Image (cartoon, rainbow, N blue to C red):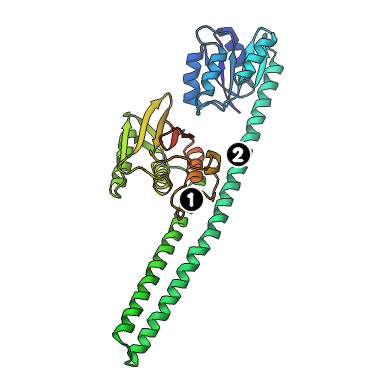
């Protein structure tokens, strides 16, 4: 059964709706104001909200607009309730994001029918999202398997060539015909082969790393209690060892999440910025963290050139070819990161390009449950 939030400033109306819904096995949260309902929605993320339109201070329309302005609650469907049947009210309710409309006095059969319709639509949407995610994951795995062939083949060729040079030098040495120049030429050529082999095997290792990141989306998470500042300081220290400067502005707050996966998210963002962002010399990457309702909002921006000749949708497509920066970069960080945030961390994200480089706004629940 579903978790449903009902909102009405009249206690009797809440009692009636609670009775109807609980008799069907639903878990019901009740709020007597829009302000209280917002807190409940952010804390519990109900699957459905039934809200009165006419309420003091914050009416149902303003309540719905506020819900839709947050990435954490914007996808929760809202069914409106009102004693009035005027067309204007129905139109206004739908314009702010409502999905249906129930009139008072309540008819149990009508309430349940409309609720069940929305829950079925939610189930269908979840299934579609899961199928789409699986399809994307499969595309990534197949794509990586294909992409690995080129650097792996080059590395094998380099090793084979290197082996041939070593055999020629050994034969010349055994026959006592090895000259100093022949030795020098052989070693120089061998060095080139080693460099080529190392470069291509490093690229293979990058792809293997991405495969591991993809696998994290499906594996069970291991949430632990984290400190925002301690987590970001650990991230900063690790990258400072690689001469990458990160500027942090964060509130001291605790939250529960999978530390390794969250660290992978930010490592992917930083690696992508370095490879593609054309960062300004001497300008640190910025990460800001604030506590908002029941989630931590991380704002990441790199002060680079932002999106150049590519849309945000295209950026999130695996193996999309771009002209942004290092063409040798694996290029899967953005879609992998998006899936880790949504699926593994149960969070939300937005990508923006407003003059501070490529910007990610990431919302992570305070409590992963």
Q: Residue at x 56, y 7 (%)?
A: 10
Look at the image and tell me in which quarter the N terminus lies.
Answer: top right
Mark 2, Cα crowd under 10 Å, few <14 / some 14-19 / many 20+, is few
> How far across and how far down the image is residue 74, in percent?
54, 26
Q: Nearer the viewer, mark 1 or mark 2?
A: 1
> How far across and how far down the image is residue 266, in percent?
40, 42
Question: Of marks 1 and 2, which one's residue comes earlier in the chain?
Answer: 2
Q: Is the residue 38 above or below the residue 166 in the image?
A: above
Viewer-side residue, 285 vs 259: 285
Task: Left or right? Give the position of 12 relative to 282.
Answer: right
Task: Left or right? Give the position of 360 relative to 241.
Answer: right
Viewer-side residue, 121 vs 189: 189
Task: Left or right? Give the position of 36 relative to 129.
Answer: left
Mark identifier at residue 228:
none
Residue 237 in sight: yes
Viewer-side residue, 301 vs 226: 301
Mark identifier at residue 129:
2
Q: Residue at x 44, y 39 (%)?
A: 306
CA distance for labels 1 and 2: 23 Å
Helix, strand or loop status at disc 2: helix
Classify residue 232 by image quadrant: top left
Q: Residue at x 50, y 68 (%)?
A: 153
> How far across and how far down the image is residue 199, in percent?
41, 63
Helix, strand or loop status at disc 1: loop
The residue that label 1 is drawn on is 331
Mark 1, Cα crowd under 10 Å, few <14 / some 14-19 / many 20+, is many
- Pointer 1 and pointer 2: residues touching (CB < 8 Å)? no
Residue 7 in sight: no
> How far across and how far down the image is residue 314, in percent?
55, 43
């Amino acid at each position: 059964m579903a978790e449903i939030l009902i909102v009405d400033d009249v206690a009797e109306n809440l009692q009636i709706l609670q009775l109807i819904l609980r008799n069907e096995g639903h878990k019901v949260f009740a709020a007597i104001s829009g302000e209280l309902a917002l807190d409940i929605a952010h804390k519990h993320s109900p699957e459905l909200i039934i809200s009165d339109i006419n309420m003091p201070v914050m009416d149902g329309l303003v309540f719905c607009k506020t819900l839709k302005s947050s990435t954490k609650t914007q996808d929760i469907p809202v069914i409106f309730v009102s004693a009035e049947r005027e067309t204007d009210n129905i139109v206004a309710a739908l314009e702010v994001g409502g999905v249906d409309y129930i009139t008072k006095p309540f008819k149990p059969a009508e309430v349940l029918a409309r609720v069940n319709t929305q829950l079925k639509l939610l189930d269908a949407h979840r299934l579609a999202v899961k199928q789409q995610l699986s399809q994307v994951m499969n595309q990534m795995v197949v794509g990586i398997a294909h992409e690995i062939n080129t650097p792996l083949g080059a590395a094998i060729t380099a090793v084979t060539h290197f082996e041939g040079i070593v055999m020629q030098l050994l034969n010349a040495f055994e026959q006592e015909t090895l000259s100093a120049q022949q030795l020098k030429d052989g070693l120089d050529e061998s060095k080139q082969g080693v460099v080529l082999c190392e470069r291509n095997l490093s690229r293979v290792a990058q792809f293997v790393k991405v495969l591991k990141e993809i696998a994290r989306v499906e594996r069970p998470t291991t949430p632990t209690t984290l400190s925002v500042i301690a987590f970001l300081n650990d991230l900063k220290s690790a990258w400072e060892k690689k001469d990458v400067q990160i500027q942090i502005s964060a509130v001291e707050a605790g939250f529960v999440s999978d530390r390794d996966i969250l660290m992978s998210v930010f490592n992917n963002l930083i690696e992508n910025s370095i490879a593609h962002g054309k960062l300004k010399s001497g300008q640190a990457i910025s990460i800001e963290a604030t506590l908002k309702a029941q989630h931590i909002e991380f704002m990441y921006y790199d002060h680079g050139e932002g999106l150049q000749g590519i849309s945000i949708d295209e950026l999130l497509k695996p193996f999309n070819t771009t002209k942004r920066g290092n063409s040798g970069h694996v290029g899967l960080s953005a879609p992998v990161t998006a899936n880790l945030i949504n699926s593994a961390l149960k969070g939300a994200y937005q990508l923006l390009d407003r003059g501070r480089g490529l910007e990610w706004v990431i919302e992570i629940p305070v409590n992963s449950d």
